[in-house]
Image (tube, rainbow, N blue to C red):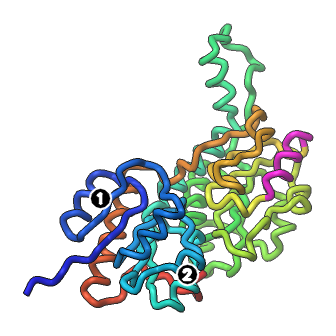
Amino acid sequence: MTRERLSVVVTRRLPEAVETRLSELFDVQLRDSDTPMTREELVTAVQTADVLVPTVTDSIDGGLLGQAGENLRLIANYGAGVDNIDVATARQRGILVSNTPGVLTDDTADMTMALILAVTRRIPEGLSVMQKGDWTGWSPNALLGGRIGGRRLGVLGMGRIGQAVARRASAFGMQVHYHNRRRLRPEIEQELEATYWESLDQMVARMDVISVHCPSTPSTFHLMNARRLKLLKPTAVVVNTSRGEVIDENALTRQIRSGDIAGAGLDVYEHGTDVNPRLRQLPNVVLLPHMGSATLEGRIEMGEKVIVNIKTFEDGHRPPDQVVPSML
């Protein structure tokens, strides 16, 4: 007797190669439009599916999980971060949660370096001059930026991505410093040539660039708050490719507008797509639409991890990328 295929609901459009493979393996319901599901659509999905494949744009909270049907046994998140999912409630209801870690490390680290260079070398300002047709020729004093070689980089959160950024920054001649919940092993510190700071306050006060790479948790909410941002040197730059909630966006905007911080490069925002309008108006701020992980290779590898997690679960084993509350 042929075993009935798992019912899988995917909440967003995924790369064609990923959708094709999902369709081959499972009884999959794909999304027609590239828009987030409404709350009502998510309710229907959790009531009918064996496996839900959400993305970071979907809020899988306790209220939604309370309406889940008996068949829902796995939430295979298409993304490394799981702060969009109430993992503890899912576990209480016997629903496993998996993610896609490690896949986007290099892509996000590359984008971090791009933002550091874009802000310090004033690339968007130069691009704007060219697009407006205002360029009248080379000038010794036009659009002077700063050299990143020799600058101090303070990495806030030295996990996979933080370490990948440290390696790239070192190749550019930057001095690497970091603050982390736990100090790295001596051999890793030595390899990265990274200096550990137990005090975040002391580190940020001495850095030229602060790069944020920590997850969104209650303990990291507004970790870079108004008080801490005021410790930065007026020549310092802030870059964030992790989670917007880690920085007090309004305080950051005020500091940059007043000239107390030299600039910022942001790929994530405290309130999602609702970006502080004053932040948009600042020429020394580079804003990107959550592009840090946006490579075709990375998106396909994410999909491959989702498929492996579902297939392993279907075969009666623990998904290799299972997430449990103690990991958060």
Residue that carries the numbered disc 2 in the rendered image: 87
The part of the image, by quadrant, that contains residue 134 is top right
x then y, percent, for residue 83: 60, 71
Looking at the image, which residue is at 77% across and 39% down? 277
Q: Residue furthest left?
A: 1
Q: Secondary structure at mark 1?
A: helix
Return the residue at label 1. Answer: 18
Q: Is residue 174 above or below residue 105?
A: above
Relative height, residue 207 to residue 90 (above, below): above
| First in residue order: circle 1 vs circle 2 | 1
Q: Choose between 32 and 152: the one closer to the eye.
A: 32
> Is residue 229 rendered to the left or right of residue 277?
right
* Residue 282 locus on image (x, y percent): 78, 35
Seen from the viewer's position, the closer of residues 239 and 305 is 305
Question: Which numbered disc covers residue 219?
Answer: none
**Whole-Å distance between the Cαs marked 1 and 2?**
25 Å
For the stretch drawn in magenta, the main secondary structure is helix
Label 2 sits on a secondary structure element that is: helix
**Rendered location of residue 173, percent (x, y):** 63, 50
Categorize mark 1 by other alpha carbons within 10 Å: few (<14), some (14-19), many (20+). Answer: some
Magenta residues? 248-259
Q: Amino acid at mark 1?
A: Val
**What residue type is disc 2 on?**
Val
For residue 313, above or below residue 164: below
Q: What residue is rendered at 53% in x and 55% in y?
A: 108
Asked if residue 34 lies in the magenta stretch, the reply is: no
Quick one: quadrant of the C terminus? bottom right
Left-right relation of 275 to 46: right
Is there a contact, CB below 8 Å, between mark 1 and mark 2? no
